[in-house]
Image (cartoon, helix red, strand yellow):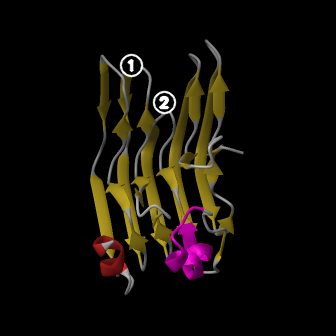
Amino acid sequence: METIYGGSVADGKDSSASAGYVELVLTGGNLNFYNAKGDSVRKSIYAGSAALNGGNAQTEQTKLVIDGSSKNFVGNKNANDALAGSGNQMVYLNAFGGGLNSTVTASSSVLIRNVFAGFIDTKNGVKKSQLYAGSNIKSQGNYRDGDTQIEVHDSILLADVLGAGFIYETDNTQFESGNAVSIVKKFGPRWMDFRDQ
């Protein structure tokens, strides 16, 4: 599966879907995807709902947790050999506490713990993860998320971290958020090694 939704999906014009409280917890698995050439490709995880092809979806409250403490993630096959020992905590993805073309009315939160987010590949290129507390908007309209928060603990980051949502390649769109909080602390001991490569 290339996209994970924690909430509901409304697919098609005049369709509608809603969800109350959604908690999506990932503690392992294979989150790696590759194109036909074998290059690594980021796919997306949404704790909230999705409105596709003219649908209308909304979620009241969300919580997304990505926790590598149990070391059950599958490493990326394109990662530099020096990182192989950390592959079981490695994630390469777009993670959203909100929805896709769908907002979270009360609050959304993201907790990232004990992971290697992003990696250096075998060509010494940087493959960044994208971590967002809010929703991802790709269709025209007026949108509003509630309060948003992202926390990153005890992790190695090759990633962008944003305390709210994100509009992507969309004109004539208004997207507002409530209060936004970003907390990033306790980087692992190899943080400088990643930055220096």
Left or right: residue 13 compared with residue 109: right
Residue 57 percent across, percent down from the top left:
56, 29
Q: Looking at the rendering, which quadrant does residue 143 occupy?
A: top left
Closer to the camera in the image, 1 or 143? 1
Residue 178 percent across, percent down from the top left:
29, 44
Q: Looking at the rendering, which quadrant does residue 11 occupy?
A: top right
Q: Which residues are magenta?
A: 78-90
Left or right: residue 81 compared with residue 151: right
Q: Which mark is residue 101?
A: 2
* Residue found at the far front of this picture: 123
Residue 105 percent across, percent down from the top left:
44, 40
Q: Residue at x 51, y 40 (%)?
A: 99
Which kind of residue does numbered mark 1 sit on?
Answer: Gly
Q: Is residue 33 depicted above or below 85 in this figure?
A: above
* Residue found at the far bottom of this picture: 189
Q: Looking at the rendering, which quadrant does residue 67 occupy?
A: bottom right
Q: Residue at x 59, y 18 (%)?
A: 53
Tell me how far mark 1 sits from mark 2, CA to CA.
9 Å
Decide whether residue 167 is among the magenta residues. Answer: no
Closer to the camera in the image, 60 or 112? 112
* Residue on which disc 1 sits: 141
Q: Main secondary structure of the magenta part?
A: helix
Q: Is residue 41 depicted above or below 8 in this figure?
A: below
Please rate how many residues cluster around mark 1, counting C-alpha atoms within 10 Å: few if below 14, some from 14 to 19, many from 20: few
Label 1 or label 2, whichever comes before in sequence order:
2
Q: Secondary structure at mark 1?
A: strand
Please rate how many residues cluster around mark 2, counting C-alpha atoms within 10 Å: few if below 14, some from 14 to 19, many from 20: many
